[in-house]
Image: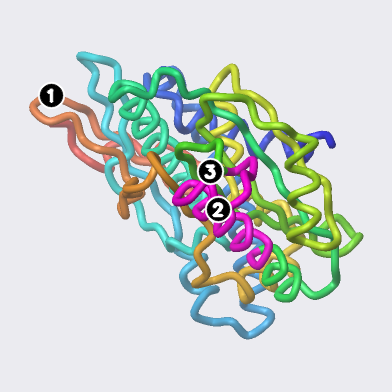
Amino acid sequence: MDAEKENPRTEVFLAVDSDSGAEGAASLPSKLARYGEARRKALQMQSFAEGAGHVKEAVKLSGCANYLLFRHYYTVDKVRLHAASFCKKHLLCPMCAIRRGAKMLRAYLEKYEAVRQQGGQHLRPYLVTLTVKNGEDLDERLRHLRSAMRKMTVARRGHISNPKKNRFVEFARSMGGFHSIEVTNKGQGWHPHVHMIWLCASEPSQEALKAEWHSWTGDSFIVDCRPLHDPVEGFMEVCKYALKFSDLEPADNWHAYAVMAGQRLIDSHGLMRGVEIPDSLLDEPLEGLPYLHLFYRYFPGKGYSYIPNEFPSR
């Protein structure tokens, strides 16, 4: 199967926001344009929520990222987001999804580098995508997907703990990794699927994995397994799960949020366990360096506009 065809803009949103090489003042206009588009879509979701009587969520979305305060550390040309109001409803708000996805991506890449430095240089990352048959009932399809994943996990653990007694499964090749659950709906029913990173010493067999996955799902043998020449690309595929919600129509976005809020949508295994995603969506400051404040406010129809003299320079 071809990998899930994603909205390229979604990937760009996350990629550039996570790129440490795009932190200078010259990159700020394009970043503000992306943030402005995310804020525009959040306000669309806010309007839907308000019209549907979901007042609490509507209020949170209304105030999210209405201003952004950056610090420009001009001696090293680094720009950091220092202050903003975030709703942290990342399944409804693309702005919070961008910021959280970028934090998640950076944390897992740092963990991957630590694994490599601690004797894991022989492990190669693979991007694995597993799907189940589309359906109209999102909750039922998610339960079906999770059931198959539990069976796969139990089979992996069984073989690793007692390889003589328990049969080998392809997932047992993975010495560590992480995954996210994602949903789409393109008019043919809900399509839940999982994107996984596997760190393997030997290449998984896609054909064998197809047969195994069909035995666990009963309705799907559609899987994709490919080596990653650039780990960032595959890790990004896993970390953008929340940003994909904003590609749904508002009514579908709300339904998916209502069904999935509070569920664990990301998890890890093996050597990639123990990653902590920072709760703050702001950037870490550069202590001891001089900076200028750059204050921007969002205006509907215009995006983010610079407001001079709103905050004094240091």
State which tag comes first along the sequence, 3 or 2: 2
Q: In the structure shown, which secondary structural element does the residue marked by tag 3 occupy?
A: helix
For the residues labelled 3 and 2, the Cα–Cα distance comes to 36 Å
Q: Which residues are magenta?
A: 146-171
- Residue 36 in sight: no
Q: In the structure shown, which secondary structural element does the residue marked by tag 2 occupy?
A: loop
Q: Nearer the viewer, residue 276 or 298?
A: 276
Is 150 in the magenta?
yes
- Residue 88 in sight: yes
Q: Which mark is residue 239?
A: 3
Which mark is in front, 3 or 2? 2
Q: Which mark is residue 165?
A: 2
Question: Horizontal placement of 283 versus 258: left or right?
Answer: left
Q: Residue furthest right?
A: 188
Query: Splitting the image into 4 quarters, where does residue 122 fall?
Result: top left
Q: Which mark is residue 289?
A: 1
Query: Residue 186: horizontal and vertical position, in percent?
Result: 85, 55
* Residue at 52% from the left image edge and 37% from the top image edge: 174
Question: Horizontal placement of 119 versus 66: left or right?
Answer: left
Q: Residue furthest front?
A: 164
Question: Does 214 appear above or below 305?
Answer: below
For the residues labelled 2 and 1, the Cα–Cα distance comes to 60 Å
Prevailing secondary structure class for the magenta stretch in the rendered image? helix
Q: Residues within 10 Å of mark 3 (few under 14, many from 20)?
A: many
Query: Residue 33: horizontal and vertical position, in percent?
Result: 56, 35
State which tag comes first along the sequence, 1 or 3: 3
* Residue at 45% from the left image edge and 59% from the top image edge: 64
Is 254 in the magenta?
no
Query: Splitting the image into 4 quarters, where does residue 249 fall?
Result: bottom right
Which mark is in front, 1 or 3? 3
Question: Horizontal placement of 153 versus 170: left or right?
Answer: left
